């Protein structure tokens, strides 16, 4: 049941309207690169989707390049700029709380000679502007910062960061991992001033396996990763995932139409959840920002004293059918502690007792009531199993 799903930051359900649009076009088999009528119809549908993606972030259609998802978009932005730039050593600035898609690329590029600076964050997961400014060197070529953290919800002041970086050196490329914020907050790439921005369809109720990379002014200086038949204006080889792209476009269209409505709903749900939590369970701590405009309102990371997150997540799932996360879903199978919570300075014990709860479009007050009753029972049960004395 979708109502028992509290892991929207990991992925979102496919919207019924998106599924319907994809089904309507499922027999559209033409290759968008073909010049005959079958291919041109496919191309028309793909360009309609490109327009919807561009409109969501106030970009030009020519600035949008389809990829297989957020990971490929991030890889393309970072590796592509590294390979196209002859400045050595190539200096990259990022943060300690980035998604693995960014951190692993940086780790790989460091083996090729790139110099990486990992900015620290405060106890709420925010990067200090002064730290960013001080990190810029003569050979700094790229800055890559995530717009909002997927585990704790902290939203970075991207516009201010871009301004600081560009005032020092306008040639530095500024890339933003916006995978977690698209469709949740208003994004205007013109106001932000970013050079590149990564997106994924499955975070906004679209299909998995597709995403997009925004490149300012259709920036093509970076090297392509996939060579082939010259698709995406010669930027990314390989026949496009047409059906998924059509679904992505529909998801963006609906996200644009409903953004404010859904944002207000999520704010109300968060307030309701926090009130219920305070009155239901003792001895807990919220990790990251609690209130304010500089956080994803749908994201709450909580530590429960004398509880192990794995046990709590399993109990919630097996007994009550509730889905929560014990960290980033992309690395939940790893034994390592959450690098995000470590960066906040939290103790190992607190990190091991932390779960992430994330709401979405299909969450309502009844769902939160059921969740809170189940959470209270689960926490009490686990605590009752502790040895006395």
Image (tube, grey):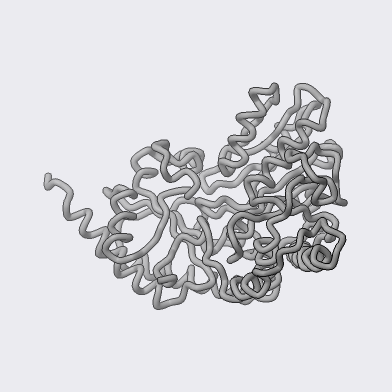
What residue is drawn where x is 65% and y is 55%?
210
Residue 13 coordinates in the image, percent (x, y): 52, 66
Q: Nearer the viewer, residue 15 or 115?
A: 15
What residue is drawn where x is 30% and y is 70%?
373
Among the 4 quarters of the image, the one containing residue 4: bottom left
Residue 104 coordinates in the image, percent (x, y): 59, 35
Q: Is residue 272 left or right of residue 258?
A: left
What residue is drawn where x is 84% and y is 36%?
169
Residue 172 coordinates in the image, percent (x, y): 81, 37
27 to 120, vertically: above or below: below
Q: Is residue 40 left or right of residue 2?
A: right
124 to 204, vertically: above or below: above
Q: Nearer the viewer, residue 287 or 103?
A: 103
112 to 75, vertically: above or below: above
Among the 4 quarters of the image, the one containing residue 97: top right
Where is the N terminus found, in terms of image quarters? bottom left
């Amino acid at each position: 049941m979708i109502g028992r799903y509290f892991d929207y930051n990991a992925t979102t359900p496919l919207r019924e309207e998106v599924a319907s649009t994809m089904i309507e076009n499922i027999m559209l088999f033409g290759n968008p690169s073909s010049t005959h009528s079958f291919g041109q119809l496919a191309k028309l549908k793909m360009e309609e989707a490109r327009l919807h993606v561009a409109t969501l972030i106030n970009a030009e259609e020519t600035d949008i390049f389809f990829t297989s998802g957020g990971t490929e978009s991030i890889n393309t932005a970072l590796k592509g700029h590294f390979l196209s730039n002859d400045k050595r050593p190539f200096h990259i600035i990022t943060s300690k709380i980035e998604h693995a898609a960014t951190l692993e690329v940086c780790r790989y590029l460091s083996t090729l000679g790139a110099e990486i600076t990992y900015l620290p964050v405060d106890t709420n997961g925010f990067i200090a502007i002064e730290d960013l400014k001080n990190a810029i060197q003569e050979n700094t070529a790229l800055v890559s910062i995530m717009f909002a953290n997927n585990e704790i919800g902290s939203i970075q002041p991207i516009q201010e960061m871009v301004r600081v970086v560009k005032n020092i050196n306008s040639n530095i490329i500024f890339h933003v991992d916006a995978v977690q914020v698209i469709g949740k907050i208003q994004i205007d790439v013109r106001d932000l001033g970013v050079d590149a921005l990564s997106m994924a369809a499955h975070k906004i109720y679209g299909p998995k396996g597709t995403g997009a990379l925004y490149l300012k002014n259709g920036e093509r200086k970076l090297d392509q990763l996939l060579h082939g038949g010259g698709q995406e204006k010669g930027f990314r080889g390989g026949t496009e995932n047409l059906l998924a792209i059509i679904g992505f476009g529909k998801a963006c269209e609906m996200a644009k139409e409903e953004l404010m409505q859904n944002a207000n709903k999520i704010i109300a749900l968060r307030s309701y959840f926090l009130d219920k939590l305070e009155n239901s369970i003792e001895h807990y701590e919220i990790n990251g920002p609690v209130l304010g405009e500089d956080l994803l309102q749908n994201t709450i990371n909580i530590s429960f004293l004398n509880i192990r997150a794995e046990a709590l997540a399993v109990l919630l799932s097996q007994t009550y059918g509730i889905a929560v996360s014990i960290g980033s879903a992309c690395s939940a199978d790893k034994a390592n502690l959450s690098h995000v919570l470590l960066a906040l300075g939290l103790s190992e014990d607190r990190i091991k007792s932390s779960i992430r709860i994330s709401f979405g479009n299909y969450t309502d007050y009844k769902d939160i009531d059921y969740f809170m009753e189940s959470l209270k029972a689960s926490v009490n049960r686990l605590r009752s199993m502790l040895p006395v004395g």
